[in-house]
Image (tube, grey):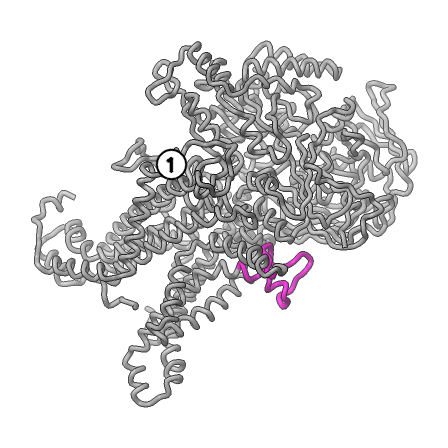
């Protein structure tokens, strides 16, 4: 099995290399760091002075060199986690990404935790209560959840929780829509943090909870109708024990695999969530840098996201093989 | 494709009865029928907008911008003073058009590459699989955002000139968006088709055809693909939903369709500043339409899956 | 959404000198237009002490090493520089006009001594009370250090003016004698401007980027930068050793970065930030019109911006002046400006291609004659040999009057403007399409290359000058001769106009400049070289819990007098 993972990892490397080159080439082709220096200006500007500034900027950003050379030095640094300097702020790209990553990690962490707990609970409950009203209700909700565009959900949820509901109740608002903390506050064990977290995490997870819970329900139903569960029941093992010790454990295997794959997709979902709720995470850093034409940040973000997705796909394979001994990886 | 035309039309009893069975199962799938009905209704309402709307979608009157609902304008007016209901119908045309076009293109590309990979195996398979991996390692939204920023120049990416009309389809400013979205929508189809072809390749009827001296193209087109129809149709419906949401997400970020065109996603983006004001209702209508379409399409997809492969039935 | 206000430091410096020019001309009557009666000024005595104020910021400083080329964001200048770096000249409101006045840093108003015309001299008498927060006095050394850092440093944003200084002499620590090698008319912006005076005792021999780029703790202003959590927020706290009169009243001011204009507004309405300075976007203006509970506001149209439809005078069909005029007569600019900016008190379109802050030198009525008038359009077009085709569009020699309007991507206000134009121009026979562009491509490639027919964007004034020769003189049409760096993207080529603009550049007499400027405006309008629209007004909104003389300073920014603000209990 170890050999399988080593091979899979080795396979990923050329894919990542080719991918990163394409990304780098695409980003370089779309943004020229000197474009905005040529912007329309009033006043008598000396053309030679502008040309000098542009040339200096080219040298500073290294865009005066051929593309392949730029890429080679970039990827050479990237494997040592040195992504160069941000064109906008002069900070290292690494430090900007690292700061943003902390916030993103909080969102992802809470998002996965809450999604996992809720979707397993909902899935198991629906499966056990198959064809009852509550099952139909939850299934219906999950259909809506899957179909709901996350950014629309975010806006509706903000309107309702920040404005409509407090107005109806005549109270102060009890959630926040900007950032992860009130200004000057920090830490993750306080009410303020929770109040900031609810809306973004809900936005991030609504689709995931809906689809995972449907998945969990299906796989639970399959297990419940399997021979070994029936046998166990027939032998007189208590229902509760059958449910949780036998059925749930086996029904979790497919979900865990799906989870690992979906976590990669979460990175995409973060862009919208962080933008709407002004959360200084990687998604917002990406969009901001993209719009400012800060190529080193954009390229580094894309590469890191790709690496994460590869890692989580590997984890998915690994989980699958560990949790289900019938599967032999070869 | 000449091979197909030369081929005598084989109508054995088996596929027909399977088709009948499929149809019966699909029609009995209540959710799918509701979905199909809703989607048809929405498509007709949007595309027949010319017949029922009271306002010219292009006519602006900026001094009447941002009015609330009234007898004259049931849903109020937008930032340019255009009737909001009319706008929703025309935005729907664009959203649906993009959704369908992207789904068809990406399914076609995915199915072709997937069956080629599955059928030929060896280095061809290896290459295509790696390309699929390449496209899957970064969330499409990231790539699309990068492309979207330059979408107005993206026409240059199309290396052939399609002219103004292509089949029944009008080439328009949204064409680059369609191609960009399709570029990142085919991988799943390719994977599924490849797996399907791999398993079909070993089946007796394929071996029989091969023994009879049929060419690869002919076996793929005549024997393999028809057996993938179920999977492909399910994927097609699901990618319609995916494409519509992807387009709306791009437009929400300001990187998708541009005025004077609009889509439901763009309408939501344009109304997002109205949170916490009386005009927040402008946010509701386009989102509701998106939700309805995606919901209907998903129901249809479920129905198709259940009908093609009753074993996979989840309910 | 794409941020629009990525203003450069050049702009900040430029705006300062411009205001000085305006001030030199005496009180002009084109003062900031204020919100309808909302603005209340509370006497300083009533402002309570203490409290934490949260301000929503649209951008963060790219870096805080102000003289380096990375410090490009005007938000950095407004929110940090003006509160910590000492400067010689302040911009204050006298009556209706904003004027430059010597700050408390100097004990006497500095004068330009021209007794030797080849070597102008300015003598600064530094206030002996003025100290840095480590209690080191602000001294002549700091002047000299600042001069050398700007004039001789690498990677300096803009050394203009400082390079004209020949020497800075220090007869005593409190006197700085600055000798110029030639007359630099913008001398008042030196030792202030976008940079401020830097402390020699802390920075001499040090790496400026390392010391300041991520924030710094020295200050000779009323505030000290306490912290800067990048991409999140930055915080000011009072300077305990501030030597001036207006010591800070608030305990803390937090600038919090918001994702975009609508996020700013939502956070403001939700009470999470108390002050915002948003762009004049559609939803912002509509919300102001609808009224925001508990909010006060100030709008200023006296800006250095001018938004216009810039026409490529060399591109079909606009090479014909009659078509350009017909184009102008097709458009109802009053309706557009009223719809977009009416709630901000801007009800008339601009009638000159000079920004409002330069109105002394402009004929502000030059374009007033161009109002929507379809009969005139028909007359002009038919007179020029055009006829309507079956689609109702003008056609000449088999070519239809197709017009593509380019603009920047993702700007909702411009989208709405162009959509309205498509409708209005369509009725008068022009087939208009909209093609928004990435700003870099539009300004970096298509503008200089003339790859546009009409472009909608704002011209932002960046340098001290009243002239427009760079924009409209034939010799500045991008060409081989000027390395394609000419700024006359509209390809205006009118000998008569060249003459007036060149004469304007050649004179230093302000009355003559004004006369020639007005004359040039008249020629431009007659030839309809482009169509001015609006001045892009500034918006400052604050919660009514914020008390004090809150107002938007056109030079030092909306938070210039932050130290006098307080929070109602």
Label 1 element class: loop
* Residue situated furthest bottom in the rendering: A236
C466 relative position to B288: left or right = right
Does residue B172 sit above or below A115 in this rendering?
Answer: above
The span shown in magenta is A174-200
Image quadrant containing the C terminus of chain C? bottom right
- When asked about the image quadrant of residue C541, the answer is top right
What's the magenta bit mostly, secondary-structure-wise? loop
Mark 1 chain: B
C398 relative position to A102: left or right = left
- Does the segment drawn in magenta span residue C61? no
Coordinates of residue B235 in the picture (x, y in percent)? 29, 55
Residue at mark 1: B54
Q: Residues within 10 Å of mark 1 (few under 14, many from 20)?
A: few
Does residue A138 sit above or below A154 in this rendering?
Answer: below
Coordinates of residue B166 in the picture (x, y in percent)? 27, 35
Residue displayed at 43% across by 62% down: A208
The total number of labels drawn is 1
Coordinates of residue C183 in the picture (x, y in percent)? 78, 22
Nearest to the observer: residue C42 or residue B253: C42
* Residue B63 visible here: yes
Nearest to the observer: residue C328 or residue C188: C328
């Amino acid at each position: 099995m170890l050999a399988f993972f080593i091979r899979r990892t080795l396979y990923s490397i050329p894919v990542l290399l080719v991918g990163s080159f394409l990304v780098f080439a695409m980003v370089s082709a779309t943004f020229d760091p000197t474009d905005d220096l040529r912007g329309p200006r009033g006043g008598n500007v000396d053309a030679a002075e502008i040309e000098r500034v542009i040339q200096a900027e080219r040298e500073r950003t290294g865009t005066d060199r051929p593309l392949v050379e730029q890429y080679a030095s970039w990827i050479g640094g990237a494997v040592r986690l040195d992504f160069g300097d941000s064109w906008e702020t002069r900070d290292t790209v690494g430090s900007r990404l690292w700061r943003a990553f902390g916030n993103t990690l909080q969102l992802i962490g809470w998002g996965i935790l809450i999604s996992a707990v809720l979707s397993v609970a909902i899935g198991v409950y629906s499966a056990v209560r198959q064809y009852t009203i509550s099952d139909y209700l939850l299934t219906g909700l999950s259909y809506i959840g899957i179909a709901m565009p996350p950014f629309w959900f975010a806006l509706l949820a903000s309107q309702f929780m920040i404005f409509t509901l407090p107005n109806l109740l005549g109270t102060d608002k009890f959630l926040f829509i900007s950032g992860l903390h009130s200004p000057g506050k920090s830490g993750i064990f306080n009410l303020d943090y929770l109040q900031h977290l609810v809306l973004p995490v809900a936005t991030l997870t609504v689709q995931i909870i809906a689809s995972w819970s449907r998945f969990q329900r299906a796989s639970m139903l399959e297990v419940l109708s399997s021979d070994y569960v029936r046998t166990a029941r027939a032998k007189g093992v208590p229902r509760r024990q059958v449910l949780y010790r036998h059925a749930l454990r086996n029904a979790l295997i497919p979900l865990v695999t799906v989870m690992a794959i979906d976590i990669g997709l979460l990175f995409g979902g973060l862009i919208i969530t962080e933008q709407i709720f002004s959360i200084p995470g990687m998604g917002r850093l990406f969009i901001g840098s993209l719009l400012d034409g800060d190529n080193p940040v954009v390229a580094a973000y894309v590469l890191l996201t790709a690496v994460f997705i590869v890692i989580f796909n590997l984890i998915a394979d690994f989980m699958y093989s560990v949790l289900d001994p019938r599967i032999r990886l070869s | 494709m000449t091979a197909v035309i030369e081929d005598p039309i084989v109508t054995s009893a088996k596929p027909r009865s399977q088709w009948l069975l499929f149809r019966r199962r699909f029609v009995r799938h209540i959710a799918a029928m509701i979905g199909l009905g809703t989607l048809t209704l929405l498509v007709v309402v949007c595309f027949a907008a010319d017949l029922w709307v009271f306002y010219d979608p292009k006519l602006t009157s900026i001094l009447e911008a941002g009015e609330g609902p009234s007898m004259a304008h049931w849903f109020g007016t937008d930032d340019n003073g255009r009737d909001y209901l009319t706008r929703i119908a025309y935005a729907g045309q664009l959203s649906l058009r993009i959704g369908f076009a992207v789904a068809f293109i990406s399914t076609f590309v995915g199915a072709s590459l997937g069956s080629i990979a599955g059928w030929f195996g060896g280095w061809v398979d290896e290459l295509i699989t790696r390309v699929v991996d390449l496209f899957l390692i970064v969330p499409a939204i990231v790539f699309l955002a990068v492309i979207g920023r330059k979408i107005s120049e993206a026409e240059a990416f199309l290396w052939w000139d399609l002219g103004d009309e292509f089949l029944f389809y009008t080439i328009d400013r949204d064409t680059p968006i369609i191609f960009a979205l399709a570029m990142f929508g085919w991988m799943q189809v390719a994977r599924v088709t490849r797996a399907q072809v791999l398993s079909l390749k070993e089946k007796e009827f394929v071996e029989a055809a091969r023994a009879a001296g049929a060419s690869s193209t002919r076996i793929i087109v005549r024997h393999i693909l028809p057996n993938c129809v179920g999977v492909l149709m399910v994927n097609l419906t699901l990618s319609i939903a995916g494409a519509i949401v992807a387009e709306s997400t791009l437009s929400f970020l300001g990187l998708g369709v541009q005025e004077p065109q609009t889509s439901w996603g763009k309408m939501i983006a344009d109304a997002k500043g109205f949170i916490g004001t009386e005009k927040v209702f402008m946010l509701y209508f386009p989102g509701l339409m998106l939700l309805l379409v995606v919901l209907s399409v998903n129901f249809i997809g479920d129905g198709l899956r259940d009908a093609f492969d009753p074993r996979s039935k989840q309910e | 959404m794409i941020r629009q206000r990525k203003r450069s430091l050049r702009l900040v410096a430029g705006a300062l000198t411009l205001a000085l020019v305006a001030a030199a001309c005496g009180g002009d009557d084109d003062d900031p237009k204020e919100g309808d009666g909302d603005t209340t000024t509370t006497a300083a005595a009533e402002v309570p002490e203490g409290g934490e104020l949260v301000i929503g910021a649209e951008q963060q400083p790219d870096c805080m090493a102000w003289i380096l080329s990375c410090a490009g964001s005007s938000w950095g200048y407004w929110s940090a520089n003006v509160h910590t770096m000492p400067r010689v000249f302040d911009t204050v409101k006298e009556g209706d006009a904003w004027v430059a006045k010597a700050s408390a840093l100097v004990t006497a108003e500095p004068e330009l001594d021209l007794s030797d015309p080849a070597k102008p001299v300015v003598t600064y008498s530094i206030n002996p009370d003025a100290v840095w927060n480590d209690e080191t006095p602000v001294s002549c050394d700091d002047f000299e250090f600042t001069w050398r850092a700007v004039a001789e440093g690498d990677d300096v944003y803009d050394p203009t003016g400082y390079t004209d200084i020949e020497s800075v002499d220090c007869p005593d620590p409190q006197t700085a004698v600055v000798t110029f090698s030639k007359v630099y008319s913008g001398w008042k912006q030196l030792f202030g401007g976008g940079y401020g005076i830097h402390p020699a005792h802390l920075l001499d021999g040090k790496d400026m980027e390392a010391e300041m780029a991520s924030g710094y703790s020295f200050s000779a202003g009323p505030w000290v930068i306490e912290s800067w959590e990048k991409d999140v927020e930055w915080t000011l706290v009072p300077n305990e050793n501030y030597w001036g009169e207006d010591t800070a009243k608030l305990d803390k001011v937090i600038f919090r970065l918001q994702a975009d204009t609508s996020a700013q507004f939502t956070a403001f309405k939700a009470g999470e930030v108390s002050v915002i300075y948003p762009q004049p976007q559609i939803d912002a203006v509509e919300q102001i019109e609808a009224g925001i509970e508990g909010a006060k506001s100030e709008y200023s149209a006296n800006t250095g911006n001018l938004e216009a439809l810039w026409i490529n005078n060399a591109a079909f069909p606009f090479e014909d002046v009659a078509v350009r005029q017909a184009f102008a007569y097709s458009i109802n600019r009053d309706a557009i400006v009223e719809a977009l900016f009416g709630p901000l008190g801007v009800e008339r379109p601009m009638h000159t291609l000079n920004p409002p802050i330069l109105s002394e030198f402009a004929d502000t009525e030059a374009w007033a004659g161009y109002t929507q008038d379809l009969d005139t359009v028909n007359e002009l077009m038919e007179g020029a040999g055009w006829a309507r085709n079956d689609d109702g569009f003008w056609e000449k020699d088999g070519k239809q009057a197709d017009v593509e309007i380019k603009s920047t991507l993702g700007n909702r206000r411009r989208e709405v403007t162009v959509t309205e134009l498509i409708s209005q121009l369509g009725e008068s026979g022009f087939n208009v399409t909209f093609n928004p562009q990435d700003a870099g491509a539009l300004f970096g490639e298509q503008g200089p290359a003339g790859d546009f027919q009409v472009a909608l964007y704002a011209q932002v004034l960046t340098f001290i000058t009243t002239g427009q020769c760079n924009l409209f003189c034939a010799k500045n049409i991008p060409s081989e001769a000027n390395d394609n760096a000419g700024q006359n993207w509209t390809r205006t080529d009118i000998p008569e106009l060249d003459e007036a603009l060149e004469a304007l550049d050649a004179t230093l007499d302000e009355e003559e400049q004004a006369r020639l400027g007005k004359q040039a405006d008249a020629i431009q309008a007659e030839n309809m070289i482009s169509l001015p629209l609006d001045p892009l007004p500034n918006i400052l909104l604050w919660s009514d819990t914020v008390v004090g003389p809150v107002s938007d300073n056109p030079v030092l920014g909306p938070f210039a007098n932050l130290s006098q603000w307080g929070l109602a209990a």
